[in-house]
Image (cartoon, rainbow, N blue to C red):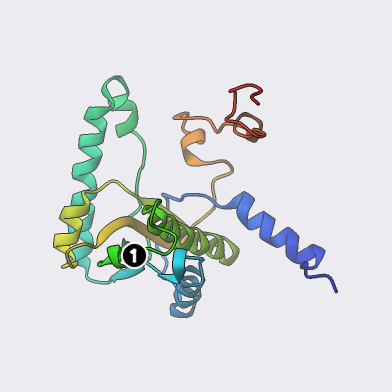
Amino acid sequence: MSQSFSEQERAAVYRAIRERRDMRHFADEPLAPEVLERLLQAAHQAPSVGLMQPWRFIRITRPALRRKIRGLIEQERQATAKALDERESEFLRLKVEGVDRCAELLVVALMDQREQHIFGRRTLPEMDLASVACAIQNLSLAARAEGIGVGWVSLFDPDAMGALLKMPEGSKAVAVLCIGPVDKFYEIPMLEQEGWASAVPLTELLAENVWPGAGHRE
């Protein structure tokens, strides 16, 4: 018996992948609690190395705390702009987060005491971060299927965020997720739309047997 989905179901999966966007513009509308629960369950169903489930989700519901997080992001936005030298003004024109208007704000973090988990991490300890990234991608794809936008913001100092959210030693904030209804999804990724960068085609990133461009080796 075939284990594949129906043609219609497969098309829906690939559509969600193809049309997922990192969103920065949100409508001033609430997110239904049951939808947020479905998105979090989708994230929690992600694969994780050694089944360690290293993700932790902190839902931000206090307006004052949201403003403080917005302040941390703005500090790093300015620092990043200065580090970009000749592209500073171009970067500052970009909208890099949607904290002010998104319906829900989540901080996603790595768990503490991760050193105790060595299954799959002895030589690749960063696999815990890869697992968290899978959880965020799950949430983003589920959100696209729900017609909900998600923006992943990484412009912040993890130590400052940890102190603000009273995170335990050894844990690490890795993402601020802006989540909520949007008026429309970007036709193409926003950074392409704004002329910041262009996506590289798969053909330039795919190779056989050796590193791309390394040539034939025996």
Extreme residue in the bottom direction: 34
> In the visual, does 96 lie left or right of 64?
right
> In the visual, does 210 lie left or right of 86?
right
Identity of the residue drawn at 22% across and 57% down? 69
Which image quadrant: the C terminus? Answer: top right
Q: Position of residue 182 (x, y in %)?
A: 48, 58
Identity of the residue drawn at 51% across and 72% down? 45
Q: Position of residue 188 (x, y in %)?
A: 57, 41
> In the visual, does 190 lie left or right of 65?
right
Identity of the residue drawn at 51% across and 67% down? 46
> In the visual, does 217 lie left or right of 178?
right
Identity of the residue drawn at 41% across and 70% down? 53
Which class describes the residues within 10 Å of circle 1: few (<14), some (14-19), or many (20+)? some
Mark 1, secondary structure of its residue: strand
Residue flagged by tag 1: what amino acid is it?
Answer: Leu
Return the residue at label 1: 106
Q: Position of residue 66 (x, y in %)?
A: 23, 62
Q: In this picture, is 49 found above or below 207?
A: below
Q: In this picture, is 21 found above or below 164?
A: above
Q: In this picture, is 32 found above or below 138?
A: below
The quadrant holding residue 36 is: bottom left
Which image quadrant: the N terminus? Answer: bottom right
